[in-house]
Every structure is written in C-alpha cells, then in structure tokens.
Image: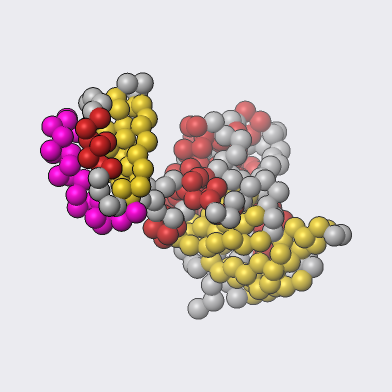
C-alpha cells in the first residue's frame, strides 16, 4: 500500500534562493504528522508543492501513490487543504458556506446536505450553522475551514499553521478536533507551535533552511535527545547532600534552582544514568531531608527543536 504522502528530492528555487532542498519525506496513513521549522524554513512552500499550488523546480511529490501536478483533478480528490489565512464569505451562514464549497467539489445536493450535517456536528458548529460567518470567532472560523477541507472525504488533510492566530480556548478546540480527524484521514500539520505538536502529533519532521533535519516519532526524539539530568526537590537546603554527590564517580555537576520562589530544586547531571539511578535514592534517604520530587528530566519538544536546528 502506498504511503499517504511521499516526496522524492523535492526542490524549489526562487532565483538563487533554495527554499526547499531535495526533500525526501514519507508519511504513513491515518496519522497526525507535524511538519516543523522556524519561520522561513520552507514549510509553506512545501505544502504548496504537495497540494499542486506550486510546481517544484526538481523532484516529485505523491499523494496516495498519485504524482502531484499543477491542475491535477484526480490527485486533488484525495486531499483537503486549510491555508494559514483561510478566506470566508462573511454574509453566508456556516451551512451555506459548506454547501457552496460542496458545489465547488462537484458533490450532489443530497451528498452535500448529509456530509455538511455530519461535519457541523463534528466541529461543534451545529448550533451556529444558521448564523452569519462574519459573526464567528477566529476559532469557529478555523473549525469551519477544517469542515470545508473534509467535505469530500479526503484521504489526506493539509493544515498550514492551523492554530497560530487563536486564543488558548480556540487552540484547544482546534487541537481536540485534529486529534479526532485521524480516524478519517492522514493529517499533515505545518506549524511552529511546538506545544501543539506535542499534544496531537504521532510523528514529526523538522526542516530548516529548506533541508530536512530529522523525521521521527516524538517519543523516539525524546529518547534520542534524553538528558542525564535528575531533578531533586527538597523542603529545605542542605550542603552535606551536595558534598556526598561530589564523591560519586558518575557525578558531573549540580545546579540549584528555586521552585515557587523558595523550595530548593537541585539539578544533578550524571555521566552514568544507570549508576546514578541506583545510588541517588540511598543518598537521599541518608540525607534525612524531606523529598518532594525526584525524577529524570525529560526534554521538551522545544528543547529538542532548538538542539536539532542549532546543530548541537
């Protein structure tokens, strides 16, 4: 079975500027795939090539096994697309907008009515379906835009920066919706908001200056870039515990930080995680201090992103 999305040496140049540089990417079916990169990394240019809105300078792109070419009607039947700044007709109601979009897809009136009702329920706009779109919040418009992109039962859904201009409640609603969508389609989400990716994505790719730096699951990235840092929080400070640490062969360094302005937090870096994990509980017990928290720190996706992009 062909992957949902595949690119082969996909390249886009604008004069002397290489916006996307020989991109090789594979996205499996029924997943939420996060396409990450700083501003100007080539994310939107890649999405435009994948959706046939821009022709590549070199290379090829495939959606569900079919090569993407500009104006290809057959390929476009396989995907839906929500751009970073979607346009709406404010004088239409939400239901009218979906009917209009359905007619552009070439759907029958009966099919449009049934599918629109399903999607308005899914995106939680059923009660607002008779209201003018001009009165919708930004989050409601984004959800309506996603419903529009899902009208023709696409196998792949492209979302370009779907939460970038939303308030926290709007972001939460859209992310909850994206999590549900993979039951129907592969979701390819281009974004620079890393907390959104951590919440909903199964796999990610990081791109910078047009080049693919890494592609992996979020959990695999965390394991690969895991840090040998233990975070230990006591109810009070004690120098004898720090002295005991320094006598251990696995000890590298310790750093103090404040939690909630007063409780001492000690970050202990070890060169041998297994040895430190075995001995630290005994050192803590011997200190006589009241332990509030003890854990091996996990890097956030933001930490990993910065490390990958900076080439560390």
Locate residue 157: give its quadrant.
bottom right
Q: Residue at x 73, y 66 (%)?
A: 11
- Taking 124 as reference, is 96 left or right? right
Q: Residue at x 17, y 42 (%)?
A: 283
Q: Position of residue 22 (x, y in %)?
A: 69, 68
Instruction: Looking at the picture, tell me which residue is in the foreground, 11 or 228.
Output: 228
Magenta residues, as a range? 271-291
Q: Residue at x 35, y 23 (%)?
A: 260
Query: How did the renderer colour the structure?
Result: secondary structure
Instruction: Looking at the picture, tell me which residue is in the foreground, 145 or 286.
Output: 286
Q: Is residue 307 visible?
A: yes
Vertical side of 62 occupied by 124: above or below: above
- Count of marks placed on residues: 0
Is residue 95 highlighted in magenta? no
Q: Residue at x 69, y 34 (%)?
A: 90
For the C terminus, give its image quadrant: bottom right
Q: Position of residue 186 (x, y in %)?
A: 51, 61
Q: Is residue 147 visible?
A: no
Is residue 273 highlighted in magenta? yes
Q: Residue furthest bottom?
A: 1
Instruction: Looking at the picture, tell me which residue is in the foreground, 126 or 114.
Output: 126
Q: Position of residue 298 (x, y in %)?
A: 37, 47
Q: Residue furthest top?
A: 261
Q: Main secondary structure of the magenta part?
A: helix
Q: Position of residue 34 (x, y in %)?
A: 53, 54
């Amino acid at each position: 079975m062909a992957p949902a999305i595949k690119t082969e040496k996909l390249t886009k140049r604008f004069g002397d500027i290489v916006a996307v540089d020989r991109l090789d990417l594979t996205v499996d079916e029924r997943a939420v795939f996060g396409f990450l990169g700083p501003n100007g990394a080539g994310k939107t240019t890649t999405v435009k090539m994948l959706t046939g809105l821009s022709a590549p300078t070199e290379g090829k792109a495939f959606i569900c096994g079919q090569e993407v070419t500009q104006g290809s009607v057959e390929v476009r039947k396989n995907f839906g697309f929500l751009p970073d700044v979607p346009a709406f007709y404010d004088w239409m109601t939400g239901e009218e907008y979906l009917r209009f979009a359905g007619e552009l897809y070439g759907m029958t009136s009966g099919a449009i009515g049934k599918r629109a009702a399903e999607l308005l329920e899914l995106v939680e706009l059923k009660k607002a379906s008779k209201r003018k779109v001009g009165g919708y919040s930004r989050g409601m418009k984004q959800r309506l835009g996603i419903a529009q992109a899902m009208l023709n039962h696409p196998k792949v859904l492209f979302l370009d920066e779907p939460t970038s201009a939303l308030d926290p409640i709007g972001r939460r609603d859209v992310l909850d919706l994206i999590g549900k969508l993979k039951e129907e389609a592969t979701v390819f989400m281009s974004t620079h908001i890393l907390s959104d990716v951590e919440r909903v994505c199964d796999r990610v790719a990081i791109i910078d200056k047009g080049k693919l730096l890494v592609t992996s699951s979020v959990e695999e990235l965390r394991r690969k870039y895991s840090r040998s840092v233990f975070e230990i929080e006591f109810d009070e400070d004690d120098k004898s515990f720090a002295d005991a640490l320094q006598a251990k062969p696995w000890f590298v360094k310790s750093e103090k930080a404040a939690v909630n302005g007063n409780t001492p937090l000690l970050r202990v870096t070890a060169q041998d995680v297994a040895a430190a994990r075995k001995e630290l509980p005994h050192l803590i017990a011997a200190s006589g201090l009241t332990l509030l928290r003890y854990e091996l720190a996990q890097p956030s996706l933001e930490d990993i992103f910065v490390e990958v992009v900076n080439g560390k």
